Image (cartoon, helix red, strand yellow):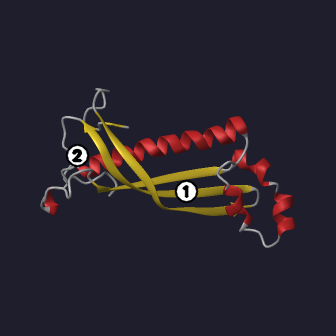
Amino acid sequence: SIPDPLAADQPQYSMAMVLAASGSRVKVQRQGDQVTLNVKVNLEGSYLAIMSQTDYTDPRNTPLAEKAAEDQVKRAMDRAITRSQKEMKVDPFRFGDRVKGTFLTWPEFDKFAWQSKYPDATVVTEVKVNIRRYGLDLAPPRVPPSEIIRKKGS
């Protein structure tokens, strides 16, 4: 459930969505003991229900819904990663498998001791949501491209 981006102060308005992975990418940068992980997640979504005064199936409003979903998923990802690093001090996301690829041999990676480095690794996340399906509507209403509201940063 995603809060309505145009009525964030009114919790009774929201959008229920199903989001499914459509690809992800993890890039590793390693300099000495410092590791930076750039995580990009692509999701495709569809509406289950829209409890709002705004028609988010209208292509002019779809980018607002996509941005709201991106923000919510990114916050949840960042919270889970931070908790795994600071509280649990374990790598449940298997980032170590990606870091391992930056070493030529297994003994080098083993000596690096990834589990002890993970809590200090920098993890940068990016989420992209594309709403492709509009529930029972077969297609969204036709709107000229000039009237579609653009997301900030697009």
Identify which residue, 22 or 148, lies in the foreground. Answer: 22
Q: Secondary structure at mark 1?
A: strand
Give residue 27's position: percent from left, percent from top: 59, 63
The residue sitting at 64% across, 62% down in the picture is 28
Q: Earlier in the sequence, mark 2 or mark 1?
A: 1
Identify which residue, 143 or 39, lies in the foreground. Answer: 143
Tell which residue pokes out farthest to the bottom in this image. 104
What is the three-letter code of the residue carrying label 1? Val
Horizontal side, residue 13 vs residue 106: left or right: left
Within 10 Å of disc 2 (Cα), the crowding (few <14, some 14-19, many 20+) is many
Give residue 110's position: percent from left, percent from top: 84, 60
Q: Classify the position of the C terminus by image quarter.
A: bottom left
Q: Classify the position of the N terminus by image quarter.
A: top left
Horizontal side, residue 93 vs residue 151: left or right: right
Relative height, residue 68 to residue 27 (above, below): above
Identify which residue, 135 or 52, lies in the foreground. Answer: 135
How many numbered discs, if any? 2
Q: Which residue is mark 2?
A: 56
Give residue 133's position: percent from left, percent from top: 29, 56
Whole-number angstrom distance, CA of label 2 to CA of label 1: 28 Å
The residue sitting at 73% across, 44% down in the picture is 90
Mark in front: 2 vs 1: 2
What is the three-letter code of the residue carrying label 2? Tyr
Q: Secondary structure at mark 2?
A: loop
Q: Which residue is mark 1?
A: 39
Q: Which mark is residue 26?
A: none
Relative height, residue 94 to residue 90 (above, below): below
The residue sitting at 27% across, 31% down in the picture is 13
Relative height, residue 86 to residue 122 (above, below): above
